[in-house]
Image (spheres, rainbow, N blue to C red):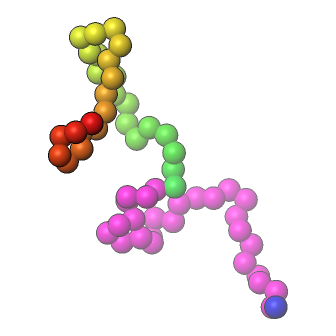
Amino acid sequence: MKDNEYQPPKVWTENNASGGVWSKINRPTAGARYEADLPVGKHPLQLYSMGTPNGQK
C-alpha cells in the first residue's frame, strides 16, 4: 500500500465550501443553536412530547 501524504489537522474545523442543499441538516457541531427561555406549564411536573402524525402519543 502506498504511503498517504494526507495528515489530518490537530484541530478539526468545518469546511463551509462543501455540502449543498442538504449540508445544514447534519452539522458536526454540538450544543444549543440559540438561547431561549424554557416554557413553563400550569402543573408542577409538565411533560412535553412531540405529537405523532395520527395524534397518538
Residue nearer the viewer, 28 or 50 = 50
* 52 with respect to 36 (left or right): left
Instruction: For the C terminus, give its image quadrant.
Output: top left
Which residue: 28% across, 16% down? 40
* 11 with respect to 48 (left or right): right
Is residue 51 in view from this perspective?
Answer: yes
* Quadrant hosting residue 8: bottom right
Spot the residue most to the bottom: 2
Which residue: 77% across, 84% down? 4
In the picture shown, does residue 55 fall above or below 40?
A: below
In the picture shown, does residue 49 fall above or below 39?
A: below
* Quadrant hosting residue 5: bottom right
Residues shaded magenta: 2-27
Q: How far across and down, in percent of the image, does residue 55 sit?
A: 18, 40
Which residue: 37% across, 31% down? 35
Q: How far across and down, in percent of the image, does residue 13 sit?
A: 58, 58
